[in-house]
Amino acid sequence: MSSSAYVKLVAKSKQQTITFEEIEKLIHYYMEITNKTGEQLNWEYGSAAFPYSIEQRKNGSETYYFLKGNTQGYNYMLVGAGNDDEGAENTYIQIVLPEGAAHGDKGKANEFSKFLAKKLDGELHLFNGRIMYYYKR
């Protein structure tokens, strides 16, 4: 059974909408900073911190990013965007762990969703249903 986490963009977030291009830039930025951390530690931390390759895919009219695991213990996760209103701009980022996702994928998805929420000052709805607030309240 698949499960999802959401980074919702609220009134106090740095921005109230997000595009797929912005999501892709955030994914690449996350990969870049984890690689730099590894360089500072003189260790291959980047590949351990985010062991995924990125593919953009479409399912009908919906576009999403398929993050495919490239080391043992990591299978895949999906990253997309959506909104609560038909026809409105994207107001949240959705991270999905589909059936077949490994235990390691859940840990990486939690880390990545927290990074996104902090970077955007968003409201994070975790896989377990809890909510974390990264904006000033």
Image (cartoon, helix red, strand yellow):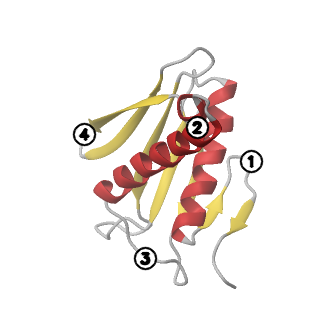
Mark 2 and mark 3: Cα distance apart in space = 32 Å
Q: Residue at x 60, y 65 (%)?
A: 118
Q: Which residue position is annotated with label 1?
A: 128
- In the picture shown, does residue 27 fall above or below 91? above
The quadrant of the image that shows the N terminus is top right
Q: Which residue position is annotated with label 4?
A: 60
What amino acid is found at the position of numbered circle 4 in the picture? Gly
Mark 3 near mark 1, Cβ–Cβ under 8 Å? no
Q: Secondary structure at mark 1?
A: loop
Say few, some or many: other residues with alpha carbon within 10 Å of mark 3 (under 14 / 14 to 19 / 20 or more): some
What amino acid is found at the position of numbered circle 3 in the picture? Gln
Circle nearer the viewer, 1 or 2: 2
Residue 16, numbered circle: 3
Say few, some or many: other residues with alpha carbon within 10 Å of mark 4 (under 14 / 14 to 19 / 20 or more): few
Residue 116: image x %, image y %?
A: 54, 58
What amino acid is found at the position of numbered circle 1 in the picture? Asn
Query: Of marks 4 and 1, which one's residue comes earlier in the chain?
Result: 4
The foreground one among 22 and 97 is 22
Mark 4 near mark 2, Cβ–Cβ under 8 Å? no
Q: Secondary structure at mark 3?
A: loop
In which image quadrant can residue 102 be found? top right
Residue 38, numbered circle: 2
- Looking at this view, name the residue that lies furthest to the left: 61
Residue 125: image x %, image y %?
A: 65, 58
Mark 4 and mark 1: Cα distance apart in space = 29 Å
Q: Secondary structure at mark 2?
A: helix
